[in-house]
Amino acid sequence: MKLITAIIREKKLDAVREALIENDITRITVIRTSGHGRQQNIDIYRGKKVIPNLIPKVKIEIAVNDEFVETTINTIIKSAKTDEGIGDGKIYITNLEECIRIRTEERGGKAI
């Protein structure tokens, strides 16, 4: 099991969500967040460095069984990519040690 975390542009959320649903990946968590990466521009105003504003982003978390990892990653990449250059986001993949469905107490891949 893996936990796939993607940080994408807000305007791409609907496209990513629809593409995931088309590929039978329907269980996701969406979190509104903000930050900046390479697109930061440190400006100097009146002799002082001005810290760049945080840019609104969306963080998506998806727990998947191993056979869905590549499908999920490829779907996010294809649907989140823009032609705007820097700022399309990142995908992080971490091992998911355990998953437990509270209602039924199922564990592991069945709980996902």
Image (spheres, rainbow, N blue to C red):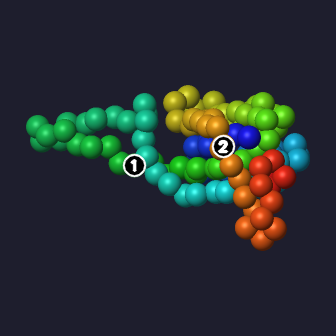
Which mark is nearer the camera, 1 or 2?
A: 2
Mark 2 neighbour density, 10 Å: few (under 14) some (14–19) many (20 or more): some
Q: Is residue 94 visible?
A: yes
Q: Is residue 75 visible?
A: no
The part of the image, by quadrant, that contains residue 41 is top left
In the rendered view, would you say 73 is above or below 23?
above
Foreground residue among 50 and 7: 7
Q: Which disc is residue 29 wearing?
A: none
Foreground residue among 95 and 73: 95
Foreground residue among 8 and 84: 8
x, y percentage for residue 43?
25, 36
The answer to whether residue 39 is left or right of residue 104 is left
The answer to whether residue 41 is left or right of residue 78 is left
**Label 1, on which residue?**
54
Distance of label 1 from label 2 (alpha carbons) = 29 Å
Label 1 vs 2, first from the N-terminus: 1
Residue depicted at x 50% and y 54%:
33
**Label 2, on which residue?**
96
Q: Residue furthest left?
A: 47
Residue depicted at x 52% and y 36%:
87
x, y percentage for residue 61?
65, 49
The part of the image, by quadrant, that contains residue 38 is top left
Number of numbered discs overlaid on the protein picture: 2
CB within 8 Å, label 1 to label 2: no
The residue type indicated by label 2 comes to Leu
Name the secondary structure under disc 2.
loop
The answer to whether residue 107 is left or right of residue 47 is right
x, y percentage for residue 105?
77, 65
The residue type indicated by label 1 comes to Leu
